[in-house]
Image (spheres, helix red, strand yellow):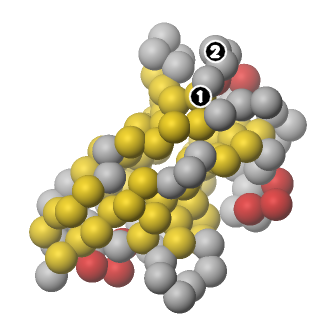
């Protein structure tokens, strides 16, 4: 069992930046493929970005390409989501998810075994 704790959410004006963090309850984060998903009110959960454990390959949703960057610091056992040029439509609860069996990030929620409880990101116009 792996527990994930997200942090870094908050309220920011459009055009601003936030950095989310995700830390697992056990070490060796680098052997998991990790991803960020988000869910806006009244909408389904959607894939934001992910990074594979085998080659650090990354994948981004078209809506965040060029604005968001996923990274991980293996020494700190932490994953990050740097969000720049935020827009009101980025408002959502952001969740980190990991899976030990995926080699590359998937945009399907069902492929991830462990999930955090989420952190709220609100972007005002």
Res 64 seen here: yes
Answer above or below: position of 104 versus 79: below
Query: Is residue 99 shown left or right of residue 82?
Result: right
| Mark 2 crowd level (few <14, some 14–19, many ≥20, 10 Å Cα) | some
Seen from the viewer's position, the closer of residues 35 and 92 is: 92
Answer above or below: position of 29 versus 20: above
Residue 52 drawn at (x, y percent): 68, 38
Name the residue at the right extreme: 101
The image quadrant of residue 103 is: top right
Give yes or no for contact between labels 2 and 1 (Cβ–Cβ under 8 Å): yes
Residue 106 drawn at (x, y percent): 73, 56
Residue on which the image places disc 1: 24
Quadrant (top left/top right/bottom left/bottom right) for the N terminus: top right
Res 66 seen here: no
Name the residue at the top extreme: 75
The span from disc 2 to disc 1 (Cα, nearest Å) is 7 Å
**Residue, x 76% and y 64% (percent of image)?**
108
Query: Is residue 98 shown left or right of residue 18?
Result: right
**Residue, x 73% and y 43% (percent of image)?**
114
Quadrant (top left/top right/bottom left/bottom right) for the C terminus: bottom left
Seen from the viewer's position, the closer of residues 29 and 119 is: 119
Q: In the drawing, what numbered circle is on residue 48?
A: none
Q: For numbered disc 2, what is the local secondary structure?
A: loop
Residue 16 drawn at (x, y percent): 15, 61
Q: For numbered disc 1, what is the local secondary structure?
A: strand
| Mark 1 crowd level (few <14, some 14–19, many ≥20, 10 Å Cα) | many
Residue on which the image places disc 2: 27
């Amino acid at each position: 069992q792996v527990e994930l704790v997200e942090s870094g959410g908050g309220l920011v004006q459009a055009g601003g930046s936030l950095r989310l963090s995700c830390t697992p309850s056990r070490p060796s984060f680098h052997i998991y493929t990790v991803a960020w998903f988000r869910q806006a009110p009244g909408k389904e959960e959607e894939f934001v970005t992910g990074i594979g454990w085998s080659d650090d390959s990354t994948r981004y949703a078209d809506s965040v390409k060029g604005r968001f960057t996923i990274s991980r610091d293996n020494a700190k056992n932490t994953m990050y989501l740097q969000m720049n040029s935020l827009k009101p439509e980025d408002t959502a609860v952001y969740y980190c998810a990991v899976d030990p069996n995926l080699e590359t990030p998937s945009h399907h929620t069902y492929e991830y075994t462990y999930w955090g409880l989420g952190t709220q990101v609100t972007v005002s116009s």
